[in-house]
Image: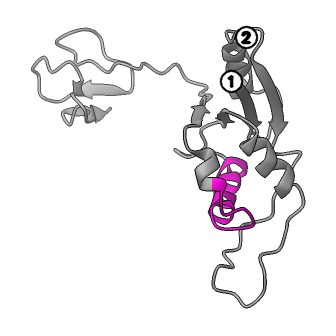
Amino acid sequence: MNRSFVFLLASTRSDGNTELLARAAAEQLPGSTEQRWLDLAQLPLPDYVDARHADRPWPEQTNEELLRQATLGATDIVIVSPLYWYSMSSHAKRYLDYWSKWLATPDPGFKGKMAGRTLWGVTAMAHRQEVSPNLTCSACTTPPPTWACTSGACCSGTAPGRGKCSRMSRR
């Protein structure tokens, strides 16, 4: 099967860091790979309403069918969302909320059709200060300006599988 990608841009800002990163990654795909780019800010969905137990049918929303068909038509779904307060954007979250509906109605075969597909995430976070990805204690090297090791021992700044070492603290 030929692969086809749908890139769901979920930023409030066009041409932002996350979109630029996704476009750079997409350039690495083979030239014959189908790509479809949809901007969720330009295809808004209202807040999701769970109507599974309501007496009325689930209302169809503007842009919903277009996004559902684009999702079903791709072998690879790429959510391109900046990181806002340790979470994806509201556009990306709202899109994923609608999966709850799509898994039940109007197409009860949605789950089966999605089996074997790949869901990707591309994210970036802008930060005005220089951030060091590797925190180290002062016994090893000079730590980033806002962190210091409180143990006095060389702890390498990270605890395996748990992120920042508990002995590192803000100055």
Residue 94 at least partly seen: yes
Residue 31: name its quadrant: top right
Mark 1: which amino acid? Arg
Mark 2: which amino acid? Glu
| 57 versus 164 height, above or below | below
The magenta span reads: 90-110
**Dominant SS in magenta:** helix
As measured in the structure, the alpha-carbon distance from the residue carrying label 1 to the one carrying label 2 is 15 Å
- First reached walking from the N terminus: tag 1 or tag 2: 1
- Mark 2 neighbour class, 10 Å CA radius: few under 14, some 14 to 19, many 20 or more: few
Q: Which mark is residue 3?
A: 1
| Residue 154: % across, % down | 13, 17
Q: How many marks?
A: 2
Asked if residue 38 lies left or right of residue 86, the reply is right
Asked if residue 86 lies left or right of residue 91, the reply is left
Q: Which mark is residue 27?
A: 2
Asked if residue 61 lies left or right of residue 23, the reply is right
Residue 152: name its quadrant: top left
| Residue 151: % across, % down | 12, 28
- Mark 1 neighbour class, 10 Å CA radius: few under 14, some 14 to 19, many 20 or more: some
Q: Which quarter of the image is occupied by the C terminus?
A: top left
Q: What colouring style does the render use?
A: one colour
Q: Secondary structure at mark 1?
A: loop
Q: Secondary structure at mark 2?
A: loop
Magenta-drawn stretch contains 138: no
